[in-house]
C-alpha cells in the first residue's frame, strides 16, 4: 500500500510540475510579447520626439531668418536642440558649428529672472556684448539658419510619424 501511495504522489507531483512548467512557459511568452510591444512603443516615441525636435529647430531657423528672434537667442536654442537631436550628431557639423560658437560666447549672459534682476547698467553691458557677438557672426548665423531650415525640411519629410502628437479638434481622428 505504501508503494502505491508513493507512485500516486509521484504522479501527482509530476502533473503539478508539468502544469507549473506550462504556466511558466505561458508567462514567458507574454513577457516576450510585452517587451516587443514596449520596444515598439519606445521606438515610436523616440521617432516622434526627433520629429518634434526637427519641427522646433525649423521654427527657430525661420524666426532667425525673419528677424522674429534675436540671433543670439536663436543660436542658444538651436544649439541645445541640436544636442538632443540624434544624440548630438549634428552639433559640430560644419554648417551648424556657428550655433555652438555663439553658444560658447553667450551662454554666460543672463536670461529671464536673472536678467530682470540686473541693474540697467549691467543689462546695457550684456546687451552690448550680445550685439557685438551677433554683429561678428551675423552672416554665418544666417547661413547656418538657412542650412538648418533646409536640413529640417528634408529630415522631417523622411521621418514623418504615422500619427501626429496633437490632432485638430475640428477634424475626425483617423
Image (spheres, grey):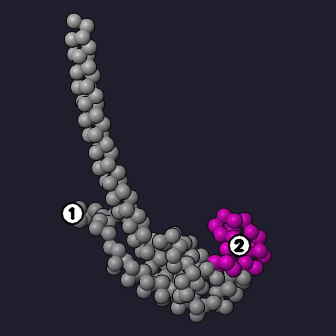
Q: Is residue 140 visible?
A: yes
The secondary structure making up most of the magenta span is helix
**Horizontal placement of 65 versus 117: left or right?**
left
Q: Is residue 66 visible?
A: no
Q: Is residue 137 above or below residue 127?
A: below
Query: Over which residues does the magenta segment extend?
Result: 102-127
Q: Nearer the viewer, residue 149 or 40?
A: 40
Instruction: Label 2, secondary structure: give it.
Output: loop
**Horizontal placement of 126 versus 144: left or right?**
right
Q: Is residue 127 above or below residue 3?
A: below
**Horizontal placement of 40 versus 57: left or right?**
left
Q: Residues within 10 Å of mark 2 (few under 14, many from 20)?
A: few
Q: Earlier in the sequence, mark 2 or mark 1?
A: 2
Which corner quadrant of the image does residue 72 belong to? bottom right
Membership of 112 in magenta stretch? yes
Q: Residue at x 67, y 78 (%)?
A: 104
The quarter of the rendered structure image containing the N terminus is: top left
The quarter of the rendered structure image containing the C terminus is: bottom left
Amino acid at each position: 500500500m505504501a508503494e502505491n501511495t508513493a507512485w500516486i504522489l509521484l504522479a501527482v507531483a509530476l502533473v503539478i510540475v508539468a502544469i507549473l512548467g506550462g504556466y511558466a512557459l505561458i508567462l514567458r511568452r507574454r513577457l516576450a510579447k510585452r517587451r516587443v510591444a514596449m520596444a515598439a512603443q519606445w521606438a515610436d516615441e523616440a521617432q516622434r520626439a526627433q520629429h518634434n525636435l526637427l519641427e522646433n529647430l525649423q521654427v527657430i531657423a525661420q524666426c532667425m531668418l525673419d528677424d522674429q528672434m534675436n540671433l543670439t537667442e536663436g543660436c542658444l536654442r538651436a544649439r541645445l536642440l541640436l544636442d538632443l537631436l540624434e544624440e548630438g550628431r549634428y552639433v559640430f557639423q560644419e554648417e551648424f558649428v556657428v550655433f555652438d560658437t555663439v553658444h560658447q560666447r553667450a551662454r554666460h549672459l543672463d536670461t529671464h529672472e536673472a536678467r530682470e534682476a540686473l541693474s540697467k547698467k549691467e543689462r546695457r553691458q550684456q546687451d552690448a556684448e550680445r550685439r557685438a557677438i551677433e554683429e561678428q557672426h551675423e552672416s554665418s548665423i544666417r547661413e547656418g539658419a538657412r542650412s538648418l531650415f533646409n536640413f529640417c525640411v528634408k529630415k522631417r519629410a523622411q521621418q514623418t510619424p504615422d500619427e501626429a502628437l496633437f490632432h485638430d479638434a475640428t477634424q475626425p481622428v483617423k
